[in-house]
Image (cartoon, helix red, strand yellow):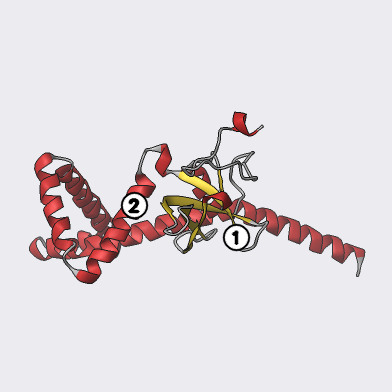
Amino acid sequence: MDPVLGKTLRSLQRNILAGVITIGPLFVTYLIFSFLFTTLAKAGLPLVHFFLAVFPSNWLGTPFMESVLAILLTLAVLYVVGSVTSEVIGRQIFQLFESALERLPFIAKVYTSVRQLIDTMMAKKPSSQRVVLVDFPIVGQKSIGFLTRTMADTDTGEILAAVLLPNAINPTSAFLQVLPMSRVTETAMTMEQAMSMLLTGGAVGPDTIRYSSPPITTDGAALPESQTK
């Protein structure tokens, strides 16, 4: 190969890779916010159309203004719902609504599962935000997971862990594994750090991480580092 051509190709490759590294996080951020704004706009469009039917307006009827109004109305509705449900009467009404949903066969399963997942992800207690490593897809290769709960084996009494393993770049798709706690490596990472690593393919994350598994106590908790030395 011509040395000049080879140098040009290497320069192109290096600059394109630098551009991907620079634009990549911005592009992922754009996709996430674009999805959120599109969802909010679709949710609020019926209200906007009803509003325009009652109060016709030429400049408000443009596609851009309809989307802006739809997003603002959706946020306003979410704010009102959050304010109402935070009050005592509002919580009681919401509990009655949830009780009605739980009597619907299929909807109850889906709603309850989603509600429990959101409560787990949004909880402030450190015990509910446990980022772990497990051997997946093969032994010796660790994957980041979220320990959602522990349970006991019916026959042996061994402590088992339910671990959600989100896919990198697209964490909305995941695997759910049930495995012994002895095969789970607990880390000191927060949920935010773990999600940053998943969304960026590992480009953003902590400088140190616990890779080897510490001894596990009978209740499924890892022994302090001072006791493992």
Tag on residue 118?
2
Q: CA–CA distance between discs 2 and 1? A: 24 Å
Q: Quadrant of the C terminus?
A: top right
Name the amino acid type tagged 2: Ile
Nearest the camera: 223 or 145? 223
Looking at the image, which residue is at 25% across and 62% down?
43
Quarter-of-image position of residue 143: bottom right
From the top left corner, tell me how far across and down residue 48 is, in percent: 18, 61
- Identify the residue position indicated by label 1 in the image: 136
Compare residues 120 and 82 and report the one nearer the observer.
Answer: 120
In the drawing, does residue 9 fall left or right of residue 39?
right
Q: Secondary structure at mark 1?
A: loop
Q: In the rendered view, tell whether residue 216 sits above or below residue 17.
A: above
Number of the front mark, 2 or 1: 1
Residue at the spot 55% in from the left edge and 58% down from the top edge: 168
* Quadrant holding the N terminus: bottom right
In the current view of this chain or complex, which residue is farthest to the top? 226
